[in-house]
Amino acid sequence: MQTAVVITERRVRLIQYDRAGALYTPLIDYHENPNMLIRFVVGLASRFEDQLGLDPSIQWGSHGGRKTPGTITIADPFTRLPKIYTMRSVRPFINRAELCGRGTRMWDVRDKDGRDLVLKDAWSTGAHGKPEYFYLAKAKGVDGVQQLVGYEDRTGRPNGEIRSFRPASVGKPFTNKSFQRIVTPLYGAPIRAFDNELELLEALYDAIAAHWNLLKRGVLHCDISTGNILLAEDRNPAPGLRGILIDLDFATEVDYTRPTTNLRAGTRFYQSIILLKGLGERYKPVHDHLDDLESFYYVLLELIFGRSDPGKTWVIDRMEEQWDNDDDELSATAKEYFLSEPFDARDVPSFWSEECKEMLRSMHEFIGKLFREKAAIVGDMTQPWTLENMARLYAEKDEHYRKILAMIEKAISGTSAMDLC
């Protein structure tokens, strides 16, 4: 929250900015009401940081009059005792500045034992389910999934929710949000930074295996993208840790019988055809593992075609133009047409191995088959469909993962054999 006072020669107005937008008073004639001007000025001159909308848990250092990295403190959710983390930089490496968004900020920090960690702040509506730390806690010990080191949830605490510093009777209705902070290990770069074919395939294999194991814990990720799959920080990671799934902001507990909503998680380029077509439809199915597996395939395609032969970027350019289109129907139609056609390996950049191209052909056929089976059940989503038919498809989910992982494993074996020659 931030506040400002606008003063003219006769009138004054107080403006408040927070994650729900802007709120302001009427223009007040302070010649007739001098007490209001005094209250505004004294309030903004407070020496208490929290009253000014600042977060006192973030404290900066200084040296020679310049700001230096300081500390960020978390209150333990059970003991309320402080845990202090040292900033490694004065700037967060991610800072979402849009006023009405989640206000996500991510910091490189270090704990008292010297471990390099990531601290993430965000304002959550809870519209997609439970808080991110809830799903991270369920993922404890799952290889290939971001692990939880600590968290803080300020729901119900002073200044922890937007409604705590907004008058209920003033202004338009707003969406309440609560402040949450999580701490996780530091992993490597996003998967798009892979150095070679083998590194990409191994990272993708481990990320899909992690997604499967997370599903066994009753959690579906729901936001598969190149930004949410990281490489390992170590140079020679153990199998299972070569690709890390992060960002469970939009994760959900698996319940295929719950009512659907029109809330849609994910990045458009990677969203499944059914999710895109179903937005706004009454009988849209819930987000499921089939949607996420389709997203994994689109991640792979973007990474494969994103490194093109010189002068041959037309495939990825066309994908980005059509699949990332603001028109949901156009994006869905373009993907559906792509999956309906046989995969043409001649379009794959020449430096990818034949084993990789064969994997793409097999995965293309399999993902297209899964989409058509699901589409045959839900139809155009304007009429009721039979949940029992969908349940039979879901009953095969373990086999779906086994088949995709086997395709990648075969390509890995071929690529590894080539490297040994």
Image (tube, rainbow, N blue to C red):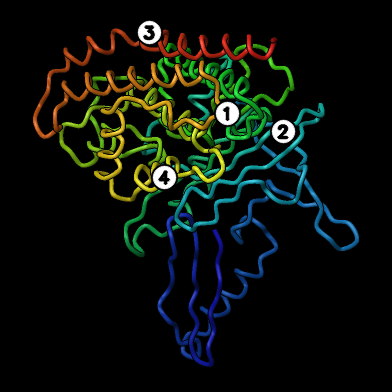
Q: Secondary structure at mark 2?
A: strand
Q: Earlier in the sequence, mark 2 or mark 3?
A: 2
Q: Earlier in the sequence, mark 1 or mark 2?
A: 2
Direction from residue 366 to residue 40 in the image, left or right: right
In the image, what residue type sits under mark 3?
Asp
Q: Is residue 39 above or below residue 297?
A: below
Secondary structure of residue under mark 4: helix
At horizontal 26% and vertical 45% (from top left) the residue drawn is 330
Q: CA–CA distance between discs 1 and 4?
A: 22 Å
**In the rendered structure, which disc, 1 or 4, sits on the residue that comes first in sequence?**
4
> Amino acid type of disc 1?
Phe
Where residue 355 appears, x then y in whole percent? 51, 15
Looking at the image, the residue that sits furthest to the left is: 383
Please identify, in this view, whether the residue under mark 2 or under mark 3 is nearer the observer.
3
Q: Nearer the viewer, mark 1 or mark 3?
A: 1
- Residue type indicated by callout 2: Lys
Task: Please say if 69 is above or below 359.
Answer: below
Q: CA distance from mark 2 to mark 3?
A: 41 Å
Question: Pointer 2: what residue?
Answer: 83
Q: Amino acid at mark 4?
A: Glu
Q: Earlier in the sequence, mark 2 or mark 4?
A: 2
The quadrant of the picture occupied by the N terminus is bottom right
Judge by depth and name the residue closer to the eye, 395 or 204: 204
Q: Residue at x 70, y 32 (%)?
A: 117
- Classify 10 Å Cα crowding around label 3: few (below 14), some (14-19), many (20 and above): few
Question: Which residue is disc 3 drawn over?
Answer: 398
